[in-house]
Amino acid sequence: MSGRDGPAVSTLGRAGAALRSIDFRWLLSGRLVSQLADGVFQAYLIDKLVFLSPESQNTPADVAKAFAILVIPFSLVGPLTGVVIDRWSRRRILLITPLLRTVAVGALIPISRGHGGWPLYAVALVVVSLNRFYLATAGAVMPALVPDEDLLVGNSLASAMGTVITFAGLVAGTQLADSIGTGGLLAVTVVCWPLAAALAAGIRNPLRAVRPGRRLGAELGQVIRELWWGARRLAATPVALGSIVSISLDQFLIGIITVLGVVVFKEEFKQGVASYGRILGAGGVGVLLGTGTVGWLEERLAKPRIVALAFAVVGVVCLAAAPRITGATILLVSFTLGLTYAWRKVPADTLVQESIPDRYRGRAFALYDLAFSVPRVLSAALAVLLIPHLSPAWIVALVGLAYLAWTPVLPHWVQRPRWVLVRFYAGGRADEAPRAVVIGGEEEPVVVLRSWVEEHRGVRSRGFKLRAADGDVMEIVAQESRSPAARGERWLLRREAADGAPAG
């Protein structure tokens, strides 16, 4: 319960409430172990492809290419993850994907002894791509393991702490790369990923698939259709769409700063892979502090305003740091991006989860992954164009201005009205009951729980509380003085609660 609804519950108390779920503890443990290995593997790739590659010429294009290799799998696999996790046992995905990554790394060890070439890239892409299935599944199952009132803290522990652990693995890997070599870095992942699979085996909730599998041809067609339906559902849900667009912009701007930081350390300060680790390390410390404070902020501010605050803080720091770009100011900007990352990402994830029904969450988070990763590729490409023509000071200043410009957008966006089409029985007279609603192009049968007439400023409106076939509850309202035909059958969707939770 937030401070706006009653006595404030401490962040630690809410975290303890979320951790009372033993299945959530297994999920969190497995995710953190897996993401530690993710960070070490990223350190391996950065060291191998950027700093040790003989063809690397220490140019912005070389750095951008390495980041694209890390990020492209997120974009390619993203559209498929939701369809898979909506059909397969999500518990089984959490078991199998770490084991498949272990096998791939085993094949990577002999390849990485030489230059590797395209086989190295291909296997590395497989390893990174499988991570998309794992993390998308871990995000989609959260509402099944944690009560609704503890979702924000659960997301904070799982998502933001996972980011911290990834940073820790990345920083440790970059600092140890010279002493243990790339083979030693891979050995760490070979130990961690099977352990993550073993921890996932402890989850007792079956995390059922929504639908059974179909023939390959039917599945491929269904993938396209369902992603389209998922996109339409997001488009019809301003809260979710605005949150995802905000995080997408954030990732685009973070990508520019990250590439710029690596280039400055390499070209101006003549430092190697350890400098990249320090940049990410500063961000990781910020994420840790942000994770510890996001619950405190949620007790005092609405989630969209937390996101707005995060954008404003980064914008101010970037503008303050722009006049003098040094190693210290780059680390300051990285720390601030990390600190406010949890303030942006955790509330945004929770807003998406709360506003999207369970049957759409897999597809929604697949599109969310796409929106999260594609901007990193685009920002790397843009950085290649900007760095030779603009000074680092100008680039940082422009990024700061972009953050400040977006600050008021999400709080305004989530207030946009949501409209649904309503299908009535027997011709649709105003005194008859709805039989279905259409949201995002999909018609959903409904049962009327109650109806009422209300008056505001002399205008009478009729409302219904409805339950969909899957248990979702919604409230719709429209002016009573106009027939459904005159309204084009559009009704204002005032409230919607997933999985049968009270709608108001």
Image: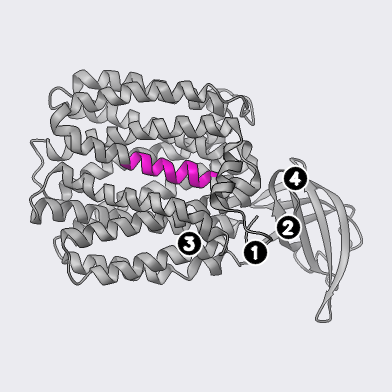
Q: Residues within 10 Å of mark 2 (few under 14, many from 20)?
A: many
Q: Residue at x 51, y 43 (%)?
A: 365
Report how far apart the C-alphas of labels 3 and 2 lie in the structure: 31 Å
- Magenta-highlighted residues: 154-167
User: Which of marks 3 and 1 precedes in the sequence?
Assistant: 1
353 relative to 368 in the view: left or right: right
Q: Residue at x 25, y 37 (%)?
A: 172
Of labels 3 and 2, the one closer to you? 3
Which SS class for mark 1? Answer: loop
Amino acid under disc 1: Arg
Screen quadrant of the N terminus? bottom right
- Please give the residue where the numbered disc 2 appears in the rendered image: 421
User: Which of marks 1 and 2 precedes in the sequence?
Assistant: 1
x then y, percent, for residue 26? 52, 29
Please tell me the numbered disc located at residue 307. Answer: 3
Report how far apart the C-alphas of labels 1 and 3 lie in the structure: 18 Å
Q: Residue at x 15, y 56 (%)?
A: 264
Which SS class for mark 3? Answer: helix
x then y, percent, for residue 234? 57, 52
Of labels 2 and 1, the one closer to you? 1
263 relative to 320 in the view: left or right: left
Amino acid under disc 3: Val
Q: Residues within 10 Å of mark 1 (few under 14, many from 20)?
A: few
432 relative to 258 in the view: left or right: right
User: Which of marks 4 and 3 precedes in the sequence?
Assistant: 3
Report how far apart the C-alphas of labels 2 and 4 lie in the structure: 21 Å
Please tell me the numbered disc located at residue 500. Answer: 4
Of residues 376 and 408, the one drawn nearer to the viewer in this rendering: 408
Of residues 197 and 101, the one drawn nearer to the viewer in this rendering: 197
Circles 3 and 4: CB atoms closer than 8 Å: no
In this view, 314 is above or below 232:
below
Question: Is any part of residue 264 visible from this angle?
Answer: yes
